[in-house]
Amino acid sequence: MAINIILASHGLFAQEALKSAEMIIGLPQKNVAVLSVTKGKTYEESLDEIQTKLKALNEKNAETLILVDIFGGTPANVSTYLTLTNENVLVYSGLNMPVLLELCLSNPENLVEAKKIIERTYPQALVNITEKAKEGEKQNANQVDSY
C-alpha cells in the first residue's frame, strides 16, 4: 500500500497542483489530501483541518508525507507540529509538479522510499531552459552535414 500525501500551501496552489497532476496522470489520487491556507484562515483552523485530514488518511495507511509550498509559512508550521507529534509523518518544503508527479507515479510504499524519490527528483526539476536552449543552438550551428 502506498503512503498518504498531504499537499499544503498558501492559497489554492496545492489544490491546483493536485488537479494538474491528476490531469497529467489521468487518474484521481485517492491517497492525497490538500490543505489550502486561504486569507482569513487562522493557524488553529489550519492545524485542526490538517489533523482531520491526517486522521482520515491514516485509516488507509499510517505513513504520511506532507509537501508544503515554503518553509516558515503557516502550511509548513502546522505540518511541523504534526511531524513533531507523530513519528509517521515526513515533511518537505518546495512543493513542485515534477516531485508530485514522480511521487504519484511511483507510489512509494514507505517514507524511506518517498524521501529517496524526493531527494533524487528535486534537483532534476530545476532546469535553466534558456541555457539548455542556447547550448543546443550552439551545438546545432557547429554540426556539419555530411553525406
Image (cartoon, rainbow, N blue to C red):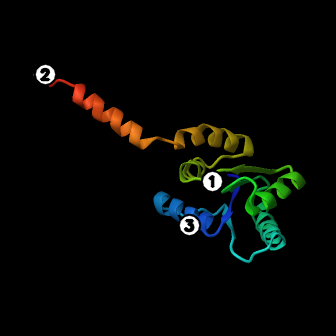
Residue carrying label 2? 146
Q: Earlier in the sequence, mark 2 or mark 1?
A: 1
Q: Residue furthest left?
A: 147
Q: Earlier in the sequence, mark 2 or mark 3?
A: 3
Picture coordinates of residue 142, whole percent (x, y): 23, 25
Say whether residue 81 is visible.
yes
Q: Which mark is residue 16?
A: 3
Q: In the displayed structure, would residue 44 be above or below residue 101?
A: below
Which residue is at a point 75% across and 51% down the rendered structure image? 91
Residue 39's label in the rendered image is none
| Quadrant location, the C terminus | top left
Distance of mark 1 from mark 3, alpha carbons?
A: 12 Å
Viewer-proximal residue, 142 or 20? 142
Q: Residue 108 in the image: x percent, y percent?
A: 65, 46
Mark 2 element type: loop
Residue type, label 1 = Leu
